[in-house]
Image (cartoon, rainbow, N blue to C red):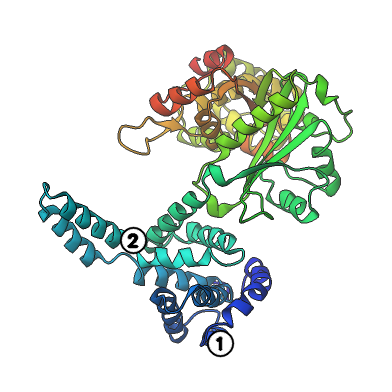
Amino acid sequence: MNKEVSPGFLGRLMTWGGLWRDIADKVSGADELDNLNPDLPEEDARKIRAGMDDCLASRGGEVSARARAATLGRAYLSLNDQGRARFLEILARDYATDHDRVRDEAAALMAADAQDFSTLQAAEGRMRDALVAPRLRLLTQFNALPRGIKFLVDMRAELVRLSRETPALRGLERDLRDLLASWFDIGFLELQRITWNSPAAFLEKIITYEAVHEIRSWEDLKDRLDHDRRLYAFVHPNMPEEPLIFVEVALVNGIAGNVQTLLDMSAPALDPEEADTAIFYSISNAQTGLAGISFGNFLIKQVVERLSHSFPKLTTFSTLSPIPGFRTWLDHRLSEGEPGLLLANERKALSQVNGAAAEAMGASPAGTKGQFKALLSDPTWITHDPLANALKAPLTRLCARYLVNERRPPRAPGRPATVLDPVAHFHLSNGARVERLNWMGDTSTKGMTRSAGLMVNYLYKLNEIEKNHEAYQGQGKVPTSTAIRSLART
């Protein structure tokens, strides 16, 4: 365990600590939680429990409640990784639902006279109250603090990470997720166009949070905000300094198939009024603490609507997307030695270049399947044109199979199985169709490692979005173009 306060939390302690210090000073006993051991040993854990009890006691008015929450929040931020984990375990275990009360109220509800509406309604009300864990009331108090909602978003990010190894935290994580989902309803969010004139602090966060194609410099960011580019973000009114999710768009002619070309800063800019295609080339969720709270589909639909209004000549809306799980899946298939993975004509093409490629790359000739696996593990295959040409057919075909046919188990009984690839699942859930695979679409180290350089276009046809969404979500059908459908069937 890290015995120091992590840099991220230290920064927030310095920022929020000042904001909350004056609030916390308004309640007596605030200094009890000011000098905790960062590890939160049991002696200090008792002080934390007392602070939580004070928050739930509801003594005094609104000012006192905010002061107690600020004191507790400052204490949490002062802890290191180990201390925060112990804080959250106390909150999860000691302030959970009173199970005995729930059983009693459930028995009373079952015994209530179904014909006596007033009695039944009162029993249902008591049952609802019994199901609300005290920790939920405590978490809600943080929302009243300056930047309190960001504090809770970051707390859930900690919970998502910690609950993977500590099952006792999962109930608390679900409670906080449900609370945040109600506060981050799409009706509360604002779609903002981000430009070079946006606040520098906000632009810096765009650079930090970009998760698909790294923004290498301020000049790179400026190019992505040029007049033939657009960047839109969802922002919450209580977190105006933070993007929640953002999408980067290129206005071009024709569907783009190579991300290096698309992001080439030396390429001439196109007059956006003449563009016929909007390429969504990067979508980044900026807040780990909002994982599982979906508003990406609303982002795409609102951006499409705004672009259609601004540029009437736009007729095509497509992504240029990574395929992050392809190589992992393929490596697994190769490790298992799946029979028939390569077709006869693919084996023949590889055999023809096998010896020459092995010699050129300093390797010994091997069997076709073994060579296929070995060559993929050596990134220099891309520099040997005959070998790359021989690999194109099997890799493209297998990638189509991966995107369309490979599924994960249903998440609930009666629900259809979903595709393996997380990016594919996102776009298919939003009503897109799998349109085209692009050979050597991303030749960066990341692109070659994750997907052997392949990228995919998902097409959003405005008159098919709802139909595609229902087909995938309701029946598990993957809408595809004719070319992709043919590849996936091979």
Residue 256 in view (yes/no): no
Q: Residue at x 50, y 78 (%)?
A: 64
Answer with the quarter of the image where residue 77 lies: bottom right
Where does the image place residue 385, in percent across and percent down from the top left? Answer: 75, 23
The reply, left or right, for residue 249 in relation to residue 409 is right
The quadrant of the rendering that contains the N terminus is bottom right
Q: Is residue 55 visible?
A: yes
Q: CA distance from mark 1 to mark 2?
A: 30 Å
Per the image, label 1 sits on a secondary structure element best described as helix
Left-right relation of 350 to 445: left
Label 2 belongs to which residue?
Answer: 132
Q: Which mark is residue 378?
A: none
Which of the two discs, 1 and 2, labels the residue nearer the N terminus? 1
Q: Relative to 387, is 181 above or below? A: below
Determine contact: label 1, label 2, CB under 8 Å: no
Q: Please name whichever residue, 72 or 209, is drawn nearer the observer in this view of the structure.
A: 72
Q: Identify the residue position indicated by label 1 in the image.
A: 31
What element does badge 2 sit on? loop
The type of residue carrying mark 2 is: Val
The residue depicted at 21 percent of the width and 66 percent of the height is 100
Q: Is residue 489 above or below residue 395?
A: above
Q: Position of residue 306 (x, y in %)?
A: 68, 30
Label 2 neighbour load within 10 Å: few <14, some 14-19, many 20+: some
- Circle 1 packing at 10 Å, graded few (<14), some (14-19), many (20+), is few
Q: Where does the image place residue 381, in percent across and percent down from the top left?
A: 71, 31
The residue under the point 79% across, 53% down is 199
Q: Nearer the viewer, residue 334 or 369?
A: 334
Residue 137 placement (x, y as % from top left): 41, 65
Give whichever of 259, 73 is nearer the camera.
73
